[in-house]
Amino acid sequence: MAHDNDSFIREVNEELRSDQFRTAWSRYGKIAIGAAVVIVLATAGYRGYEYWQEHNASQSGDRFLAALNLASEGKHDEALAAFQALEADGSGAYPVLAQMRAAAVLAERDDVAGAVQAFKAVAAEGSAPEAMRDVARLRAAWLLIDTGSYEEVSAEAEVLTGGNHALRNSAREALGLAAYKGDDMARAKEWFQAIADDATAPRNVASRAQIMLDNIAASGKAP
């Protein structure tokens, strides 16, 4: 009898569950189907976008390498045009890489003013990695040593000289040379001494700084 009762109870429970499922499906079935369709479409769209991104990045990479080859062959005008085109319609990181390399090409063909402006544009590009923006500032500063004033060099380089910044000693060297060129020996001595006092300064940079400190001492123009 107990067995019959258990069977009866199971049948009732199954029927109840079946009725509950039918009721729930009648209420929410369309919503469930719609949600499933949305998930499938979103997944397909994301995969398609990934493929599109990878395809475009691959094409941009090929174009970037082709432009680099033109630059290495001394075809500056063709290389510059290729980099500028990639900057305009490339994908991924390649537009800003092309912008940086185009600035270098301008420097290589002795368009110093154009190169400085191009490097400044990279430094001001918010979407570029911070390290690349800092290198662009330093490149502009070094170009300005010969063509600009100390103040112009300082506007680009001084922000890089503090703390443990990876480019601090190269920036200090640029500022020291700009001050030396402007016959401001006291200021030049300060920057070169900062390099000499930095135990982590690269050996070649430290050696050049010491040579400049010796020259300044020999000139008698700085205490």
Image (cartoon, rainbow, N blue to C red):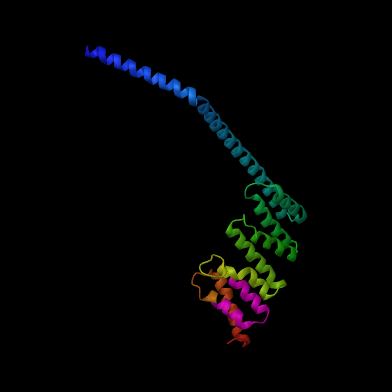
Q: Is residue 64 above or below residue 220?
A: above
Q: Quadrant of residue 103?
A: bottom right
x and y percent of residue 131 in the render? 58, 59
Question: Which residue sits at x=71%, y=63%?
Answer: 117
Q: Is residue 170 visible?
A: no
In the depicted structure, whether residue 130 falls above or below residue 86: below
In this rendered view, identify the residue nearer to me: 53 or 83. Answer: 53
Q: Between 19 and 184, which is closer to the camera in this rendering?
A: 19
Residue 202 spot, x, y in % from top left: 53, 68
107 shown above or below 59: below
How far across and down, in percent of the image, does residue 35 sit? 52, 31
* Visible residue check, residue 47: yes
Q: Quadrant of residue 119?
A: bottom right
Tell which residue pokes out farthest to the left in this image: 1
Left or right position of 122 against 30 = right
Query: Magenta span covers which residues?
Result: 170-193
Relative to 60, residue 178 above or below: below
The tally of labels here is: 0
Quadrant into which the N terminus falls: top left
- Residue lying at 54% horizontally and 70% vertically, measured from the top left: 162
- In depth, the one of 159 and 195 nearer the eye is 159
Main secondary structure along the magenta-highlighted residues: helix
Task: Please state if 40 lies on the left or on the right of 115 as rendered.
Answer: left
Q: Nearer the viewer, residue 50 or 148?
A: 50
**144 within the magenta span:** no
Residue with the most extreme right position = 77
x%, y% of residue 87?
Answer: 70, 51
In which quadrant is the C terminus drawn?
bottom right
